[in-house]
Image (cartoon, rainbow, N blue to C red):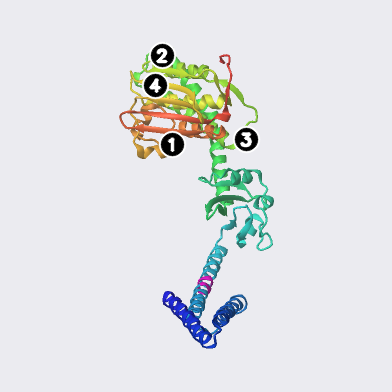
Amino acid sequence: MLTNNWKSELYRLLLWLGAALVVGWLLNLIPWALAFAATAFAARAIYRLHQLQQWLTHRSAIEPPEASGLWGEVMDHLYRMQQKDRRERVRLRALISYLRESFTSLPYGAVMIDAENNIEWSNHAAQTLLGLRFPEDTSQQILNLVRAPEFIAYFESEEYSKPLEMSSPYRSGMYLQIHITFFGKRSRLLFFRDITQTFKLEQMRKDFVANVSHELRTPLTVINGYLETFADSFSSGKVGDTNPRWARALDQMLIQSRRMQTLINDLLLLSRLETLPQANQHDALAVRPLLEIIREEALASCGGSREITIESDDSLALIGQREELHSAFANIIFNATRYTEAGGKIALRWYADGEHAYLQVQDNGIGIDSEHIPRLTERFYRVDKSRSMDTGGTGLGLAIVKHVLIRHQARLSITSKAGEGSCFSCVFPLARTAREPLVAQR
């Protein structure tokens, strides 16, 4: 349509110039007649441009001025575009209003943050939970208003795969769970909710386990002591002729009491790992001597029926708590001996690449189906419950490993296939290592 009008406008110009040429020829003033015609046509175009400019600047809410030909079509086209844009803006404003009302009605706090870390919008729950006010805090830096160190570290890390749990800097005794996601061009959406009740229930559970374990420890120690005394008396023949069934019963009771004692010790250790603050002082540990001690303990427990080898980068030290790391490594290695048949091989490796340091325990044992791997660090979770009595484990070993590694900014990686063995890797950040020759520690 515009193309046809453009041709019409050109045709009109040619007719105008042709008429001027005829008049000029009749009057013998051809140059003046053509100049007058061109000036008149240009003046008309300038007037139409002025009309268009005035309409776009001051009268965009009304219909365009009347015009014919190409100018009329251009103005009508612009008018239709304006109307479409106006309807789209109304729709978008309604959608934004709807979304804001939805977020406002949420019991969870919601904050929109732009690419410069300025607050764009927040709902009412954000004021209740975190003290952010809308619209007073609009365009304020989020890190200037929420100054909790753990929040600042989490926000600046840009690693939001896991939520942050922290005490509220606004209300004493409140605990929050915070989720952050990116959207648009580096803008962020921050969600947070009150988990105070969940936190208190979890704390009650931890306290209950710790208190019960502590209270059971003393009577169990007494029972275990008497059972050992009776067992020694039977084995030495001090009690005379006695039915052999009593000896077998005492042996079974002693085995189970020792197993219960190990379970209680593991529960207390796990409770300490969960509740005690992380120590500020860490030692630079030589890993090979630590692995050699654990290897001797593991071989003693299985009667030397497994082959355990050690490969270690002896110039690479691990910075951490010796007792906690010994417990974590021992749990992994003892698990490998339990689930590897006699004659099997277990390889211990300590090394680093350009990003992490690794303590790797690989065996050729019975392996684990992939469906069980995500739950292995849960308390008391067992892949094969029928083997629990045979292996003598408490079901807490990998839970202890998990908490020790968390306290050392590390993680546990597990790969396994049923019937082909398993590989457990403790993955440490390079900041937890040091390159220096160390004297063996025992």
Q: x, y (%) of residue 2?
A: 44, 75
Tell me the amino acid under the disc marked 4. Answer: Ile
Q: Quadrant of residue 434?
A: top right
Q: CA distance from mark 1 to mark 4?
A: 24 Å
Residue under numbered circle 1: 380
Residue under numbered circle 2: 235
**In the rendered structure, does residue 295 fall within the stretch colored magenta?**
no
Label disc, if present, on residue 47 of the rendered structure:
none
**In the rendered structure, does residue 88 fall within the stretch colored magenta?**
yes
For image coordinates 40% across by 25% down, the residue present is 362
Residue under numbered circle 3: 277
| Secondary structure of the residue carrying numbered label 1 | loop
**Up/down of 261 relative to 106, above or below:** above
Q: Tell me whether the residue at label 1 lies in contact with that at label 4, contact meaning CB atoms closer than 8 angstroms.
A: no
The answer to whether residue 216 is seen in the rendering is no
Q: x, y (%) of residue 66?
A: 53, 85
Q: x, y (%) of residue 232?
A: 45, 15
Which of pointers 3 and 4 lies earlier in the amino acid sequence? 3
Which of pointers 1 and 4 lies earlier in the amino acid sequence? 4
The quadrant in which the C terminus is found is top right
**Up/down of 57 relative to 210, above or below:** below
Which of pointers 4 and 2 lies earlier in the amino acid sequence? 2
Q: CA distance from mark 3 to mark 4?
A: 34 Å
Name the chief secondary structure element in magenta: helix
Residue under numbered circle 4: 346
| Secondary structure of the residue carrying numbered label 3 | loop
Tell me the amino acid under the disc marked 1. Answer: Phe
Q: CA distance from mark 4 to mark 2?
A: 36 Å
Tell me the amino acid under the disc marked 2. Answer: Ser
Local crowd at mark 2 within 10 Å, few (<14), some, or many (≥20)? Answer: few
The magenta-colored residue range is 85-89
